[in-house]
Amino acid sequence: MKVYLVGGAVRDSLLKIPFYEKDWVVVGATKEELIGKGYKQIGKEFPVFLHPETKEEYALARKERKTGTGHKAFSFEFDKSVSLEEDLERRDITINAIAQDKKGNLIDPFKGQEDLKNKIIRRVSDAFKEDPLRVLRVARFAAKLNGHGFKVDEDTMEEIQKIVSSGELTTLSRERIWMETYKALTTDNPEVYFKVIEECGALSQICPVSQLDTSFLAKAMKTQTDPNVRWTCLVASNSSLEDINNSFNVPKEYVEISEVCSLIIAFKKLDSVNVKDIIELADKTDIYRKEERFLKAEKISNFCIDNNSNQNLNWNEIVKLINNIKASSDLKEGKLIAKKLREDRLNAIQLYLSES
């Protein structure tokens, strides 16, 4: 039995960038042998195990064969005869197909080190086209490694376009699409991910738009690392916001922030505003119960608008003022209470604006 470090840990160590996970491949062993050594099996479709002490993932070397359409339509062979090179050949790109033995020696049958030197993202083999998820993975690695000068090579981009043209991208689950998109949002250059999937035609198969304006995202990413902030900057100004959020299967918190931000952007684009406009925005965004959400979205909106004539409004003060006004205890009927509360808020904001 031989064990090799593979994948991102090898790639990133060669690039001298931090990595936080290690993946291992085991050659010349069976699952029974690993279980006998205390490893715990966690993979159902193919044997992946947790090391009894480090809890790192160890997978038996395997070969794959396409059996149908989609990301999961594969059969696997993982007996003791599968070689390290056969396992590396099934991987997506050459810089992810480098292995390292326990002595530190590198095994690189597909010239991944050469591509690292030349800063190229290149497919390993013709099997690349069999898995539609690789379209999104290549886009994510392009985003992750853009700051190091990496580009997707022309041949690989052509293969990606062929996958898109085949229609197999539509077989990916929305959960898997979001997983890759979320990872891309955590990179230093997330806008590259969206540019790649736009260029290859994948974007229009994922959602009802063929283009996303990444300028606001690019503006925010210099100081904002929160994926929620970055996603909102990307989509909040888009007229197809609801459909985009749904197509990418974004979490509820992301949906809410982007929708509130969209309403704030529309408000800030008004030529002029009055007290009723402010109260109407408060009603639509539920400032009364979701104060923190509103203030977060309002800060994000400043990245998403070029010409903002209303930025002199201090929303922290306005929100505090609105929420400090309480319902009158003298009134008993619900409609009268709501009407009086609204009047008090309108008057308070009017006074605040006149004194500002």
Image (spheres, helix red, strand yellow):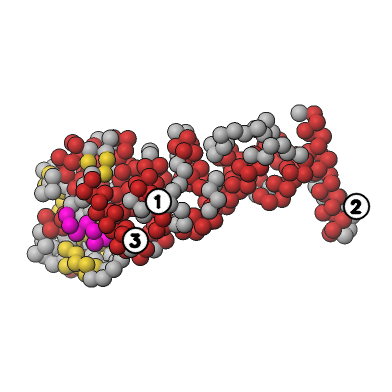
Q: What amino acid type should be assigned to the residue bearing mark 3?
A: Leu
| Residue at 53% across, 48% down | 238
Label 3 belongs to which residue? Answer: 169
Are circles 2 and 1 on residues that touch, CB within 8 Å?
A: no
| Quarter location, residue 221 | top left
Where is residue 40? Give x, y as percent.
27, 63
Q: In which quarter of the image is the C terminus?
A: top right
- Magenta residues? 125-131
Q: In which quarter of the image is the N terminus?
A: bottom left
Confirm whether the magenta stretch covers residue 321. no
Where is residue 315? Give x, y as percent.
67, 37
Where is residue 244? Give x, y as percent.
49, 55
Q: Distance between the residues labelled 3 and 1?
A: 14 Å
Count residues near mark 2 (Cα–Cα under 10 Å), then give few for <14, some for 14-19, many for 20+: few
Nearer to us in this view, 302 or 197: 197
Q: What amino acid type should be assigned to the residue bearing mark 1?
A: Thr
- 284 to the left or right of 8: right
Label 1 belongs to which residue? Answer: 181
Label 2 belongs to which residue? Answer: 330
| Residue at 84% across, 44% down | 344
| Residue at 26% across, 44% down | 152
